[in-house]
Image: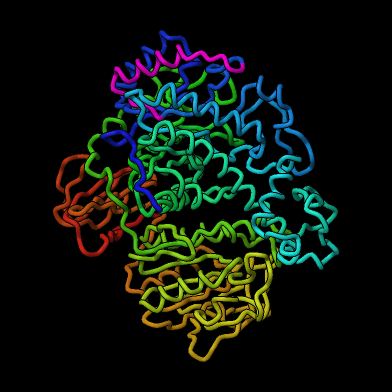
Amino acid sequence: MATTPRALRLDALAYGGDYNPDQWSEDVWREDVRLMREAGVNIVSLPIFSWPQLEPQPGVYDWAWLDRILDLLWENGIAIDLATATATPPSWLLRAHPEMRPMDAEGHLLEFGSRQVYCPSSPVWRENVARMARAMAERYGNHPGLALWHISNEYGDHVSRCWCPESARHFRRWLQNRYGTLDGLNEAWGVNVWGQRYTAWDHIETPKKAPGPGNPTQLLDFERFSSDAMLELFQLEIDVLREVTPDIAVTTNFMSMFRDLDYWRFAEVEDLVTDDAYPEPADPISHVGASLNYGLMRSLKDGQPWLLLESSASATSWRDVNVPKAPGRIRVESLQAVAHGSDGVMFFQWRQAKYGQEKFHSSMLGHRGEKSRSYRETKALGLELQRLEPVRGSRVRSRVALVVDWDSWWGSSAIESLPSQRLQWAQQARAWQRALYLLGQPVDAVRATGPFDGYDVVVAPNLYIADAAQSAALTAFSEAGGTVVVGPFSGVVDATEKVFDGGAPGPFRELLGIEVDEQWPLRDDDTERVETAAGTFANVVWSEWIEEDADVEVRARYGSGELDGHPAVTVRAAGKGSAWYVSCVLDDEGLTAVFRDVLTRAGIPARDQVDVHLDVVTRADADTDYTFVLNHGRDPLTVDVPAGARDLLTGQTVADTLTLPRYGAAVLASPRAGAVPFLTLTTTTD
């Protein structure tokens, strides 16, 4: 039975960051707390990587320093996102149990000297993780400053898959649970190809490097298993914490659109979705991709507010070239997260480190202390966020949802024997979301089986792996009046990587009214054309020979190459709604034209003038729409706005147009309207 998630114990928008007091003297702690209060910090995350300091020897604990800093923080009104300190093992544990070291796909054991040096399946690791989580919960479960449990840290960041003997044993157990018998596994894996039949369970290994392409179903199952192994590790700590502290919310920090873990399943077992987001400062349109990441975060728990748990105050330290954020960009990117549903803004980290791997990673308090630009800007942001308190708890209003399906993501990126390695789920999803963003429609995320309540349009950029339940859900949505858009190479195989009888689009054949005779990928140096009513556009990477039923309308055709004249984009009436199929991979201009056509026919507004730097998102409660209008660019933008709206950031009522300067922002409060507020550009810049 589903339970109501526990809430973050904080009566304000969260503001703060990771804190590592064990890297500093206690004199610095007092200075930190003073500056935190000045900057409006009300919550910090700690002690994420402090297991060796808390348990320097097996069973010997040193709690005193953590006791003092927690008390000091709470005495100054700063709550704690308390980590279980299980993000990485202490050296004594690894040296006592070298068998828990992770192994890569080529059989190399990874060594101590960084973080996450553990095999997720290791019984020794799991036993010690549970023991440490219990020790933390029993010590601090009643601390008045405890606002949230922070389990581990960025699961899978460095080790998301392990190929060691222990993982192989765990993989076999997972397969036995999934398929029951060896005959069931052999049937699922299609072992009659290339003589891969198994006659004993212990013959099965993790899919290490082989002489040729690996078995597709084995590779896919290993992706599923690896995500599940991490989920088991997460659930282990959740169970301990809920036993000892049943009223405290639990989370683990996600990493935005992260391929390796099925976040739908992780979000089901936690109370609060939190995310670590690091848009690339060198990319002037990184905010577009960030909006898709945030759309997923707010959707993982049915539209509930989430929390940005880590972001960068300026430069990171882990890219090849780490460009700082320009003045003003910290603010607008932070407000973007709030616009897209985060109930706060937090950074990595509070005070910039003097040593270690992240000493050049920016922080709220830079190496220059109070004089650092990052402190001046984050202090101003902290005080400004207090004006946005009315938006806390409100939800984003969206009419469009994008299907996020980890099976299809894994299938399009882990399998070697595909028609082309160039067509992958993630690139397709980002391209489709970018077109919808340009047209002024923020995008939520959904599973392929829904629910789709409240949406007018559901887009599935790629459903390579499909089933009857997905088809039934999308068909019911369309027949009830919704618009479905399905992308190329969808409905190709079932959950065991077997091609559907009759070929693609498999279970979507009746809904879409088309059949795919052949996939027709393009060479890397090849570009073809697709002709639409709006113009002719470039097609790259992929095309398909499709044949349509008599009741299908062709909205675009291939305009060159071997498929010249064949349908490229189709639409079919389905009940009260419609179902589109896009068989090609269009450039940004072409996708924008196709989706303008989709939105127009669905009765949803789409911008005539587009500007990649304009971001408009509305959060709402029962009475009020809070429309965030953000300019991510260097040139001013002017937009139409609701008459009489009040800007929460300035406290002023705005006129019928609003001009935003470089990296400018406004948060417009107005009575909740029946339709989602839609703002249009009145001027654009070259």
Determine the image quadrant of residue 102: top right
**Closer-to-camera residue (420/79):** 79
Q: Report the label total.
A: 0
Q: Nearer the viewer, residue 207 or 383?
A: 207
Residue 302 rendering spot, x and y as whole percentages: 38, 54
Horizontal and vertical percent position of residue 671: 16, 55
Residue 102 higher or lower than 27, as above or below: below
Colouring: rainbow
From the top left corner, tell me how far across and down residue 172 is, in percent. 72, 50
Residue 456 sits above or below residue 560 on the image: above
Q: Going 59% across and 72% down the picture, which residue do you hit?
A: 491
Residue 62: in magenta span: yes
Q: Position of residue 439 (x, y in %)?
A: 38, 63
Q: Residue at x 60, y 82 (%)?
A: 515
Magenta stretch bounds:
58-81
Judging depth in this view, the residue of 36 and 284 nearest the camera is: 36
**As rendered, which of 495 and 681 lies closer to the eye?**
495
| Whether residue 107 can be seen here | yes
Residue 100 lies, with reference to residue 600, above or below; the image says above
Residue 663 visible from this viewpoint: no
**Is residue 670 left or right of 242 when viewed as pictured?**
left
Q: Which residue appears farthest toward the bottom when viewing the image? A: 550
Give the side of residue 182 with respect to residue 59, left or right: right
Residue at 20% from the left image edge and 45% from the top image edge: 647
Asked which quadrant contains residue 529, the reply is bottom right
* Location of the C terminus (image quadrant): bottom left
Task: Determine if the magenta segment contains residue 680.
Answer: no
12 left or right of 594? left
